[in-house]
Image: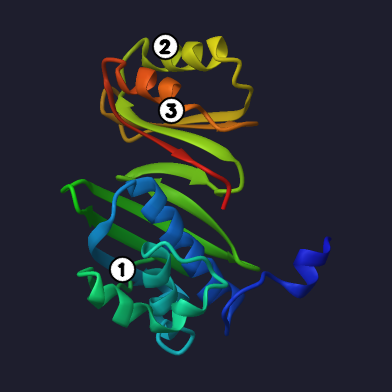
Amino acid sequence: MGVFDVVGPVMIGPSSSHTAGAARIGLMAREILKDEPVEAVITLYGSFAKTYKGHGTDKALVAGLLGFSADDVRLRTSFDLAAQQGMNVVFQRSEAEVDHPNTVRIAMTGKTGKKMEVLGVSLGGGKMEIREINGAGVLLSGEEHTLITVHRDKPGVIAQATTILAIGHINVSNMRVFRSAKNASAVMIVCTDSPVPQEMVSMIQNISGIESVVTLLPL
C-alpha cells in the first residue's frame, strides 16, 4: 500500500469514488471522443444513481466532459460553465443490474457530429476504469500512454497497426483486442511506454478497416 492509498487523491470533495473518480471518467470520455462535446446523455447506475446529487457526481462528470481534472475548483460550477459553452447534458437513472455500484454510461456528440458512447466505473480512491466503448467491452485505466482503434474485425488490421508501431520503435507494454461479434466492430487498446507520434497515428488511421484512432496521455 502506498501513500496515495492512505491519503487519497488531490481533489475537490466530498468523495473520492463519487466525485474524483467521476471527474476522471468524464475526462477520459472526452479524450476518447477527441472532440468538444456539445451533447451528453448520462445514465447512472447503482450507488451513482441513488446519491449522485448529494455527492456531486453529476457536477464532477460534467466537469470532466469540460476538460477539468478532479482537483479543479471549477468543478463546483460545472453546470453553469457547460451552459455557457452550449453543452446540453441530460441525466437519467437506471435500475438495471450492473457489475459495479459506481457505474455510468455517457453517450456523447461532438461539435463535428462525431458520436461516442463509453461506460465507466469508479473504483475508489479516485481510480476508474472504462469498460465499454461503443458497446464493445474493454478495460482502460487511463494510467499509461494509450492508442485506441475502433475498426472492422477482419484479418490483417491488427498486424498492420502493430507493424507500424514496431517500425517506429514504440515499445508496447500491453495490448488487448475486444469485439462485439465476429466480423463486427472491434476495439484495440495498446498501452505503450511512450506517446505515439502523430505521423504514426495518421498511418494507422489510413489502414483499410480502421474507423477511428485515439491516443491518450496518462491522466
Q: Amino acid at mark 1?
A: Thr
Q: CA distance from mark 1 to mark 2?
A: 36 Å
Which mark is first along the chain, 3 or 2? 2
Extreme residue in the bottom direction: 54
- Which residue carries the number 2 mark? 160
Q: Residues within 10 Å of mark 2 (few under 14, many from 20)?
A: some
Tell me if mark 3 has few (under 14), some (14-19) or many (20+) residues whose alpha carbon lies within 10 angstroms of its own: few
Residue 30 placement (x, y as % from top left) = 37, 55
Q: Quadrant of residue 14?
A: bottom right
Instruction: Give the CA distance from mark 2 to mark 3.
Output: 17 Å
* Render colour scheme: rainbow
Circle 3 sits on which residue?
Answer: 198
Q: Report the disc number at residue 43.
A: 1
- Image marks 1 and 2: residues in contact by CB distance under 8 Å: no
Q: Are marks 2 and 3 in contact (CB under 8 Å)?
A: no
Kind of residue indicated by mark 3: Gln
Instruction: Please name the residue shown 50% across and 62% down the image.
Output: 24
Report the quarter where the N terminus lies.
Answer: bottom right
Q: Is residue 57 above or below residue 37?
A: below
